[in-house]
Amino acid sequence: MKTPLRWKVAQAVELKWWQRYLRYKPTDEYIQWKKDYWITFLEKIDVKVSPNEVVLDAGCGPAGLFSILNKNKVVALDPLLDAYESKLPHFSKSTYPWVTFYNKAIEDFESPFVFDTIFCLNAINHVADLGLCLENLSSLLVPGGRLIISVDAHNNEFLKRIFQLIPGDILHPHQYNLSEYCSMIERTGLKIQHKDLVKKELIFSYFVCIAHRL
């Protein structure tokens, strides 16, 4: 996969953001706070994960949903995992023995098995090749499997065009509205069955979409 310059810059900025964000946060307190956050998040979007499900946490970051799925077979991947482990005391792969970690972009990930549930949270706006990323996520699902994906979607068409032309949000190389994201997801053979508005702000709204593979 070719990596656009804008994506490379976004990845470097992403790492710096995490370093600044976590600088003064005690490690154990932050990890527990994040676990509580994910439990509440799943309750809010009414998603349950049964112990027999094989789960992929795609674009997991240093404190992803993988942290609370200790009864599942879990794969977690992120192209910055090695950097997080070396530069952030808040993340160590050995803390999560139930997880198999891959330092890979979603677009480049290959798996010998498929997944019942894929979470792609706070990640899709960051990927290098959005179309390839969504195609790969769809192909990694079992028939009937579900993709739970979040997007930061533009509220205003004019501002969306400005952000596409000028990198006003360097962390997010992709700038689309909800309808456009949903169309791209469904073009991969998935069917969106639920859309949940989690948080509405001036420029972006944060949505969680649940799609199933046909």
Image (tube, rainbow, N blue to C red):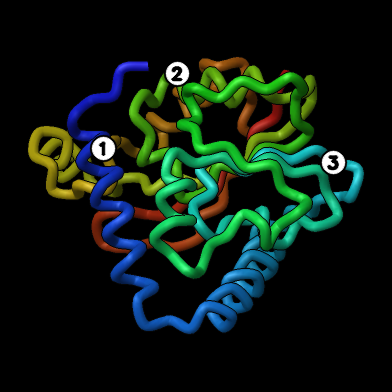
* In the image: residue 120, left or right of residue 65: left
Q: Residue at x 75, y 30 (%)?
A: 115
Query: Is residue 73 depicted above or below 87 in this figure?
Result: above
Disc 3 marks which residue? 53
Q: Residue at x 46, y 31 (%)?
A: 105
Q: Label 1 neighbourhood size at 10 Å, few (<14), some (14-19), many (20+)? A: many
Quadrant for the N terminus, please: top left
Query: Is residue 111 depicted above or below 205 in this figure?
Result: above
Mark earlier in primary sequence (1, 2): 2
Quadrant for the C terminus, please: top right
User: What type is the residue that disc 2 sits on?
Assistant: Leu
Q: Which residue is drawn at 58% across and 56% down?
A: 64
Q: Where is residue 27 in the image (x, y as percent from the top left)?
A: 52, 78
Rounded to the nearest angstrom, the CA distance separating label 1 from label 2 is 15 Å
Disc 2 marks which residue? 132
Query: Is residue 68 depicted above or below 123 in this figure?
Result: below
Mark earlier in primary sequence (1, 3): 3
Q: Residue at x 72, y 48 (%)?
A: 99
User: What type is the residue that disc 3 sits on?
Assistant: Glu
Write down the quadrant of residue 6 in the picture: top left
SS class, disc 1: loop
* In the image: residue 67, left or right of residue 86: right
Write down the quadrant of residue 119 in the picture: top right
Mark earlier in primary sequence (2, 3): 3
